[in-house]
Amino acid sequence: MRLFIDTANKKIIFAIINDKNEIIDFFIKDTNNDVAKTSIFLLEKFIAKNKISFEDIDGYMLTIGPGSFTGVKVGLNIVRTIDLLYPVQKIYTIDNFDLLKEKDTKYTAIRFGKNKFYFLNKKSTLSKPKIITSLKEYKKTEVTLGYDNFSKEKLKEKIYDNSFKFVDNLSKVKLKYLNKF
């Protein structure tokens, strides 16, 4: 059984995935900018609701950003803390742009702040994420707007597409913060 954790941006997302890659339960909630305060509490409730313990989990699927410094660190720190009591057997990571992108759109934008976006032209292999303040110059049909349409089905698609990358050691997980752009 694996646990998916995304705390990198404005939502907290958890999912439990069985050995057949089926999503057993899915949880998504706005953070209201208090991801550090609420994520552990919400994760404990989520685990208890599903009548499992951290001992039952043999792998973790984790987003690595881009995101806020605190948000990106929270997910990894949760897994590191669990690892102290129940050694983590497997860790899989995914970039948030890869998690959110859709096949039929040209751009992916992740909202942060009131009028700012992490923005990536995913059709260009040379494109690097940048910060923009408006999406007005882009057609709505060309842009995947962050978590607006993220769902259990989208996560399932990423799992089945093998979008997650295996990392053989927690110390090798490389996070992406806003200041790296």
Image (cartoon, grey):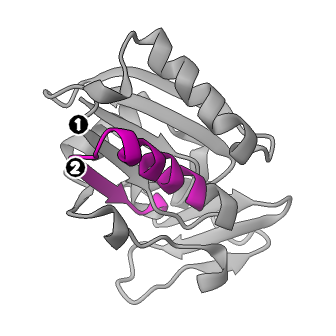
Residue 104 lies left or right of residue 56; in this view the side is: right
Q: Position of residue 96 (x, y in %)?
A: 48, 59
* Residue under pointer 1: 58
Q: Is residue 25 left or right of residue 113?
A: left
Count residues near mark 2 (Cα–Cα under 10 Å), then give few for <14, some for 14-19, many for 20+: some
Asked which secondary structure carries label 2, the reply is: strand
Q: Nearer the viewer, residue 115 or 32?
A: 32
Residue under numbered circle 2: 90
Q: Which of the two residues, 138 or 62, is positioned nearer the viewer here?
A: 62
Contact flag, marks 2 and 1 (Cβ < 8 Å):
yes
Q: Is residue 71 magenta?
A: no
Q: In which quadrant of the rendered image does the C terminus lie? A: bottom right
Residue closest to the far left: 20
**Residue 41, how many percent across, how many down?**
64, 28
Give the secondary structure at mark 1: loop
Residue 87: say if magenta. yes
